[in-house]
Amino acid sequence: MKLAACDYTFPKLQWEQSLRIARELGVEAVDVGLFAGRSHLDIQEVFTDLPRAAKRVTEALNANGLRIADSFGQPGKVFEENAVNHPEAPVRQAAAEFFFRLLEFALRCNGSHMSLLPGVHFESESEEDSLKRSVDELAWRVEAAANVGVTLSVEPHLGSIVPTPKAASRLLDLTPGLTLTLDYGHFTFQGIPDTDIEPLMARTSHFHARGACPGKLQSTMGENTIDFDGVVRAMQKVKYPGFVVLEYVWTEWMELNRVDNLSETVILRDLLRRLEMASPMSAQ
């Protein structure tokens, strides 16, 4: 199991400090977030001088024995802002420019994976029209990323155009080559059982792990209802090739600032390691 951490798990620390914590956690890599208005790395500063920003990131990762697992870009402070499927062409153009800059950032940091949000349903139109535009916009992004050796994924999330496993699966069916950054918690929050989520694992290239339960998008591991034993078995069944990211976050949205991120990250890390070692497939 390739474990990774996120630089955005500890937003109150300086960015380099978050990398030192990742190193002490014993993970291989780090997800680097470029989120409008709330990430360690300021989007405008990064995109203004990509060579300089990538040099800083690469040197800091190397200094801590880490590599980049994923470049995760969110170009808006809310989901609708600069969404990939925005109805207005100038906004979609801004989203496209963000994509190309993020892709260049990933490449300059020696990354081979990047994540985006899938878009939202705009109430001025039918859900089907919003979905079709997501498909159209993501299709060319998949091709552009693949042409330079980068795997593109989207994260199905609460408030997105694909809030359920069924909707996420349909988006993938309509967009050949697209993969998922899968976080069970967005479905668990809604009371959707693991058995309905598990089929998505075969179409997942990046995995976000954290505790969740019905009504709580992020919970302590004591409250958690996700069967991580089943998650590990599902990964082994499909020979999941990607990172398993310890993705506790700290933000006011959905009250995700109610958990001790450091302690819960350690508890989850140790659980995943035990489950992998205990799995019959790991002994083969």
Image (spheres, helix red, strand yellow):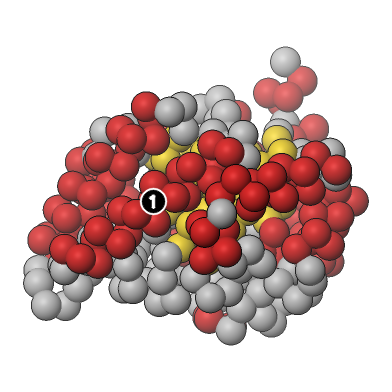
What amino acid does circle 1 point to?
Answer: Phe
| Res. 121 visible in picture | yes
Q: Quadrant of the N terminus?
A: top right
Count how many numbered circles sit on residues in the image: 1
* Residue 123 percent across, percent down from the top left: 16, 77
Q: Quadrant of the C terminus?
A: top right
User: Foreground: 240 or 66?
Assistant: 66
Choose top left, top right, bottom left or bottom right for residue 7.
Answer: bottom right
Lateral position of residue 272 relative to residue 42, left or right: right
Residue at the outermost right position: 24
| Res. 229 visible in picture | no
Choose top left, top right, bottom left or bottom right for residue 273.
Answer: top right
Counting other residues with Cα less than 10 Å from the Cα at mark 1, is it few (<14), some (14-19), or many (20 or more)? many
* 8 relative to 203, above or below: below
* Residue 65 percent across, percent down from the top left: 84, 39
Task: Label 1: state its secondary structure.
Answer: helix
Which residue is painted at 11% across and 77% down in the image? Answer: 124
- Which residue matches tag 1? 99
Which residue is painted at 44% across and 76% down in the image? Answer: 77
Lateral position of residue 282 relative to residue 73, left or right: right
Lateral position of residue 60 relative to residue 131, left or right: right
Lateral position of residue 144 relative to residue 42, left or right: left
User: Foreground: 217 or 160?
Assistant: 160
* 83 relative to 144, above or below: below
* 260 relative to 239, above or below: below
* Residue 188 percent across, percent down from the top left: 49, 64
Choose top left, top right, bottom left or bottom right for residue 264.
Answer: bottom right
* Residue 60 percent across, percent down from the top left: 79, 48
Which residue is painted at 80% across and 32% down in the image? Answer: 277
Which residue is painted at 79% across and 71% down in the image? Answer: 13
